[in-house]
Image (spheres, rainbow, N blue to C red):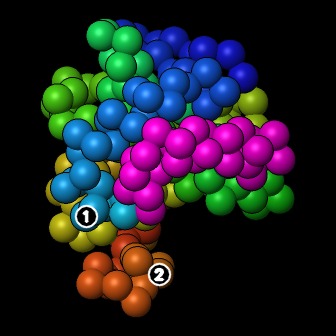
Amino acid sequence: MQRQTGDAVSLVPVSRLDASALHAMIRRNEDRLALFFPGLLHAGASLEKSRRYIDHHEEMERAGRSFMFGIPASDEGLAGLIFLNAIDPDARVAEAAGVVDFAHEGCGLMSGAMRLVFDIARDRLGLARIRFLIAPNNARSIALAGALGFRREPRKLRRFAAGTDRETRLHRYTLELCR
């Protein structure tokens, strides 16, 4: 997949991500990731684990099961990550998730990057719906979902980090992609 560019935002496909930039971003954001992306912490444990994490996501992309994009920072580092996963081509739906470096919060980077991912989901993958799964205490993601036009579904979907001290219910938000 080629680099995608929108209004002041671009996405870098997983195959072009730099492991050292991924490692550095994870290390800078450990506290936040522990709350909302605990699985990503393992990838930041070492530079080698960051490389393996990228390799794993390249394999997932080749299989059409998920896509991971980097959001480049102006300093050649990594400002964030976006995931498009749990892709169900028959139901034409996928889940999206993202994390932005604390230094890049509040400038519209994530909303612009998500819009690019929605274009990819609709135009290249033929998807009709995107879902966000959001912890009820994740105010920034809830605000982002609202700004992007997502609607909260009335039921809770599944446990987050079951069996850990982070057991809580995630709420499901859905966006219908229009052509």
Residue 74 placement, left or right of 158:
left
In the rendered view of the protein, which quadrant contains the N terminus? top right
Q: Position of residue 10 (x, y in %)?
A: 47, 16
Q: Which residue is drawn at 61% across and 45% down?
A: 52
Separation of disc 2 and disc 1 at Cα?
16 Å
- Residue neighbourhood size for the residue with mark 2, other residues' Cα within 10 Å, grouped as few (<14), some (14–19), many (≥20): some
Comparing 131 with 51, the one in front is: 51
Q: Which residue is drawn at 25% across and 64% down?
A: 35
Magenta-highlighted stretch: main secondary structure?
A: helix
Q: Pick out the residue farthest to the bottom.
A: 163
| Eye-nearest disc, 2 or 1 | 1
Q: Considering only vertical position in the picture, is 34 above or below 53? A: below
Let me know if residue 46 is in the magenta part: yes
Disc ID at residue 166: none
Q: Do the residues labelled 2 and 1 touch (CB within 8 Å)?
A: no
> Where are the magenta residues, as a range?
39-65
Q: Mark 1 points at which residue?
A: 35
Q: Considering only vertical position in the picture, is 13 above or below 93? A: above
| Secondary structure category for the residue under label 1 | helix
Question: Quarter of the image holding residue 99?
Answer: top left
Q: Name the residue under label 2.
A: 158
Question: Given the image, on which type of amino acid does mark 2 rest?
Answer: Arg
